[in-house]
Image (tube, rainbow, N blue to C red):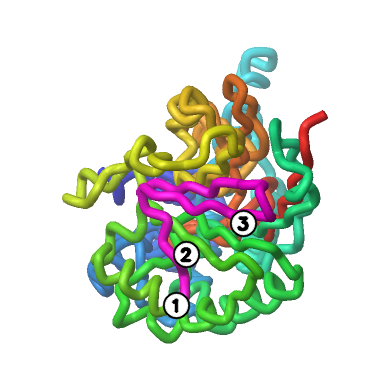
């Protein structure tokens, strides 16, 4: 069903866009077959690499698949809009209007340009996004405390070592007090990704680099990746917390495992365990990959939750669907009871659909301020 779903846009393009064009049949059939192959990118990934989540194909080929698949989907949307417009006009004219080939050429060019732009936006090393968060009860000693959130790096053949190294260099230049990584660091097993993730070990922050798991870590031998986290000098915050101190002042950073962990026989998220023994009255910043359970976090007195997972919805319009699948949370700040929730658009995204049209990737520096 998953692969059939991606074949539907191809069917629209083949029958409603290509077939009416005044081109030789052989050319139309050839283009249709090429687009059919592109539409089955995930099926090809499954056959060649064993997983739709980690295509172990050459990077240029992964980029080409994403370009062609995105262009096909966009063109299908444009063609459906064109057909609906023609039907509306037919109600007034009494017949379906003829669509000049030039209209279809324009739609095709627009789909290609938008897909090329969207893939380029997905692949870039993201620019800095600076935000300030007012934390109730934040001690004065932590006023101006700076942490950098990296999330959804999805290091893979699409986001390889060169890209990871550029992210690390840009992050280190921010001179952060703390770096937090909120899941989905990788796509692929340790054997395939060891070289690509190696630059992560060079991340530097005064109070350390802490990480939680996302859902993708469970797809590729979770235990092996948690061992690799430690080899990369990442400190896992898996249902536990740390206490940062400035003299007598305290700030708690807690983390939980991903909500999908139970399906893989791993330890499910346990916020109670994560907070056990935390100093009373100290503000708590929670790292939780998926934002869906924000209401639960708010009831536990969390001041700020940092999440990712949604990639910001990736495309205007699609973000509304992603929001519905995540209890309404998709991008940016939300107030959940007395808690603030920040849903990061992601440093990168899943290589199976590398397209950004609207919601931008981000390298996020968060400066803490006491709430007035």
Which badge, 2 or 1, is on the more N-terminal residue?
A: 2
Above or below 133: residue 68: below
Q: Position of residue 19 (x, y in %)?
A: 48, 50
CA distance for labels 3 and 2: 14 Å
- x and y, in percent, of residue 148 in the image: 66, 59
- Sooner in the amino-acid sequence: mark 1 or mark 3: 3
The disc at residue 232 is: 1
The residue drawn where x is 73% and y is 49% is: 142
Q: Which residues are magenta?
A: 233-257
Give me the disc on residue 149.
3
Answer few, some or many: residues within 10 Å of disc 3's Cα (few below 14, many 20 plus, some between 14 and 19).
many
The kind of secondary structure element at disc 1 is: loop
The residues bearing labels 2 and 1 have C-alpha atoms spaced at a distance of 16 Å
Name the residue rendered at 23%, 68% in the picture.
50
Q: Nearer the viewer, residue 87 or 339?
A: 339
Q: Which residue is mark 2?
A: 154
């Amino acid at each position: 069903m998953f692969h059939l779903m991606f074949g539907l846009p191809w069917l629209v393009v083949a029958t409603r866009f290509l077939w009416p064009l005044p081109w030789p049949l052989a050319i139309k059939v050839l283009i249709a077959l090429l687009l059919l192959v592109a539409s089955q990118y995930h099926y090809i990934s499954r056959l060649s690499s064993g997983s739709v989540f980690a295509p172990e194909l050459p990077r240029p080929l992964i980029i080409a698949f994403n370009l062609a698949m995105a262009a096909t989907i966009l063109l299908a949307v444009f063609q459906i809009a064109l057909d609906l417009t023609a039907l509306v006009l037919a109600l007034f004219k009494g017949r379906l209007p003829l669509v000049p080939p030039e209209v279809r050429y324009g739609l095709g060019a627009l789909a290609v340009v938008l897909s090329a732009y969207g893939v380029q936006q997905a692949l870039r090393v993201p620019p800095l996004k600076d935000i300030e968060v007012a934390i109730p009860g934040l001690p004065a000693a932590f006023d101006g405390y700076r942490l950098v959130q990296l999330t959804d790096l999805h290091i893979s053949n699409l986001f390889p070592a060169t890209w990871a190294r550029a992210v690390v260099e840009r992050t280190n230049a921010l001179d952060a007090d703390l770096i937090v990584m909120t899941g989905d660091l990788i796509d692929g097993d340790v054997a395939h990704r060891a070289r690509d993730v190696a630059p992560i070990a060079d991340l530097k922050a005064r109070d350390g680099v802490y990480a939680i798991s996302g859902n993708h870590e469970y797809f590729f031998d979770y235990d092996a990746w948690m061992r690799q986290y430690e080899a990369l000098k990442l400190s896992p915050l898996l249902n536990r917390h740390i206490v940062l101190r400035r003299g007598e002042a305290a700030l708690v950073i807690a983390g939980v495992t991903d909500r999908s962990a139970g399906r893989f026989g791993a330890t499910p998220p346990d916020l109670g365990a994560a907070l056990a023994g935390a100093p009373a009255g100290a503000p708590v910043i929670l790292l939780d990959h998926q934002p869906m359970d924000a209401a639960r976090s708010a009831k536990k007195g969390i001041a700020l939750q940092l999440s990712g997972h949604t990639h910001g919805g990736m495309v205007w319009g699609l973000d509304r669907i992603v929001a519905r699948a995540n209890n309404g949370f998709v991008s940016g700040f939300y107030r959940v009871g007395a808690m603030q929730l920040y849903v990061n658009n992601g440093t990168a995204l899943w290589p199976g659909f590398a397209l950004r049209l609207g919601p931008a990737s981000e390298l996020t520096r968060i400066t803490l301020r006491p709430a007035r």
